[in-house]
Image (spheres, helix red, strand yellow):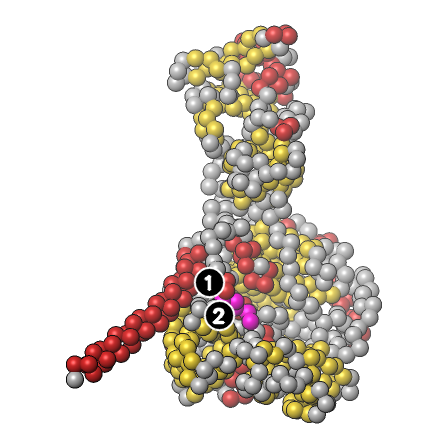
Amino acid sequence: MKKRFLIKLLFVALFYLNASSQQDVLTGITSKWEQYSKTFPAERLYVHTDKNFYTAGETIWFKIYQLDTAVKRSGISGKVAYVEIIDEHSSPVVQTKIGMEDKGGSGAVDLPLTLHSGYYTLRAYTNWMKNFGASQFFEKKITVINPLKSVEVPDSLPDHGTINLFPEGGNLVNGIPSQVAFKVLDKYGKASFGTGYLLNESNDTVRVFSPYKFGLGSFDFTPELSHTYKVVFVFDDNTIVAKTLPHIYNEGYVMHAEENGEKIKVQVRTTKQAGEIFLIVQNRQVLKAAKRNTIQNGAAEFLMDKSDLGQGISQLTVFDNEKQPVCERLYFIPPSLNTNVKTNASKEYYNTREQVSLTIADASSKPSNLSVAVYQLDSLQSENASNINTYLWLEAELNGSVENPEYYLSGNSPEVKKAADHLMLTHGWRRFNGKAFLNARNDINYAPEVLGQTITCRITDTTGQPAKNVQVFLSIPETTYKLFSASTNDSGIAKINVLDFYGKGEIVLQMKEFQNRFRKQIINPFFDQYTDNRYPPFMISSTSKQLLENYSIGMQSQHIYLADSIQQFVVPDLKDTLPFFGKGLYTYNLDDYTRFITMEEVLREYVREINVGAKGGGNLTFKLLNEDFNVFNVYNILVLVDGIPLFHTDKIFSVDPLKVRKIDIIPRNYFVGNSIFYGLVNFTTYKGIHEDIDIDPDAISLDYEGLQIKREFYSPDYSAEQQRNSRIPDLRSTLFWSPNVSSGKVEFYTGDNKSKYLVVVEGIAAGGQPLRSVTTFEVK
């Protein structure tokens, strides 16, 4: 009896020891995930544009939203967004930087008149998003037409379309039933249809299949290593394409997920007959489930409530007992769309140059962050298939462009669910790589710009090696002088946080000493990597010729008659309008004194805090009083001309004093970055541009684009009869744009184009949910 009891006790102990070990593995995986989520929180942007079809020379108006993502919850949201227009060769044709606030950021870009007709990509990203590659950036297709240039026809088109194959979970394994999804595109890159055949090495037909929706579909089969397989797809136009089946592994894991009532069932099959297996589910970087199970006879099953996964796209990753990811796929649960915002026009029909009154009703408990666009609808300009709902719930997590994304948000019918699953298996195939968080390190190449824009420079020595621990100084000689400093890291990189720098201006990069020993380079802040997303060849109907001419005339008439009105800028609200050093303790306005023709005389005769002396070779010395210690210092004085350091202080004697308006002096210790100076002197010239003054031959001086200065959207006022009767044409295709609106009335006037118009209101609720509302009216 005692022996039997001891055996039973030992069995129980081994059971709990094994359970504890299994739990340790699961805890290790989840803790790794939490560590990864905190170290690399995801950031998402969405851009609402005034429309999606433009004429070369037109202005694109846009609003950038920071979606409710892990990075926003972490408090490290970037204060700068980079916006680019990219052509089909992945070359930027427009680049700008937008300052971001709590409600996002807004701006405008003018399309060059030299652009050729075609599809372009508008993309937006932050510095932090660069860490995860261009696939994480916001991208939107826009169409640009240049009626003055003929459409460029591609040199050649493929002879046939393409078919791509995606095994569910990632791999095909010998002898294990699998689901293979596929995506079919015609030679123009559009979703296509036809019939597919899975053939073995004897050309025997193993499966016959066809696309279900939008060129997407799937088929089931059990691969065997004793056979080789290929897929032959016959398009509706009788063209044929062949594709070899993905590699079949002798050992491994296969997963399958499906709905089972209100549950989600995840089945895992493997060539292993026993062992532990784990499932991690996350939604928008929030851990939703962490489950453990035991493999029995080569299979294991997980069952979860649908409500546990969260709305939208969840990522399901299977790990083995060694904490290695072995399968992964995406699963989609249709969201409940927020309908709190409603938009109505006061009338269905309007006359030309008549006032339109829109009512925007917001039922949210707190004010929402909204933008509104009103634009013309016609055969060229249609409602954009992609919007803030489809992007947040679908496109932000998927590869490539999604055809008709609103279809997948249209309900819970079996047809929509099946199509959505095909979308997850193709566009989301192996999107999430579990190894990324298991091997996560804390090295971050691109830090979030939480304080404002960062100017990055690289310093190397004459052999090209990184210069470590070298202090650099960056000057921005504007009306409000700015001076910033930073030290290089082990890679020779210095990152300088720059505040309140708007528009294009000069920047000057210097070092305090040993200038000729180093090479200096300002690094381009825009990202030079691109996705491989490609659009179909651009084609336009010949019947649209008259409409294109109307668009071109409308664009040109605005530039001719309304040039001043459409170029209204808003003066930035600067945090500080004083120079970086504030006010001088002593200021000498040289016009208050008798003017001398040499700087030596000015400093000797009028400036008490500066002592001019002589040194060997007949050269002059510049000494500044330090009132903290009551001594004159000749070294380590910060001398500036229009806010730019003059580290060779004796050069000040070559400055023409008749060009200098005033001298500001701070005769006390002054800190800039890691450097301490025994006083500061700034010489301000009349023009403020250090004209004809040799600052430093080793300094880098270049034009640099700061944050974009905001522009006012021009909307004419026809309330007066004289303005209504004006003969100046009003051919605007965008009647109204506002990046910041709230509930209530929005009023504007129609133009001279008689057409149907679409009103689009998009935004983010206070709780982070996307909002969208559309309505139409007609001008007769």
Q: Which residues are magenta?
A: 430-434
Q: Label 2 is placed on what type of residue? A: Pro
Q: Position of residue 246 (x, y in %)?
A: 64, 77
Q: Quadrant of the N terminus?
A: bottom left
Q: Earlier in the sequence, mark 2 or mark 1?
A: 2
Vertical relation: 686 (above or below) 726: above
Q: Which three-letter amino acid code belongs to the residue tagged 1? A: Leu
Give the image quarter of residue 34: bottom left
In the depicted view, which residue is nearer to us: 549 or 587? 587
Residue 349, position as x, y percentages in the image? 59, 75
Residue found 54% across the figure and 10% down from its top: 612
- Mark 1 residue crowding within 10 angstroms, few (<14) / some (14–19) / many (20+): some
Q: Nearer the viewer, residue 599 or 147?
A: 599
Horizontal side of residue 645 vs 258, given as left or right: right
Q: Quadrant of the C terminus?
A: bottom right
Task: Residue under label 1, please give it.
Answer: 438
Main secondary structure of the magenta stretch: loop
Q: Identify the residue at image location x=53%, y=50%.
A: 446
In the displayed structure image, the side of residue 353 where residue 296 appears, left or right: left
Q: Name the residue nearer the viewer: 773 or 195.
A: 195
**Position in image of residue 382 (x %, y %):** 65, 73
Q: Residue furthest left?
A: 2
Compared with 601, 199 (above or below) is: below
Q: Is residue 275 visible?
A: yes
Q: Vertical placement of 379 versus 77: above or below?
A: below
Callout 2: SS: strand
Contact, CB < 8 Å: mark 2 with mark 1? yes
Q: Which label belongs to residue 325?
A: 2
Which residue is more in the foreground, 522 or 32?
32
**Residue 688 part of the magenta segment:** no
Residue 355 seen by the camera = no
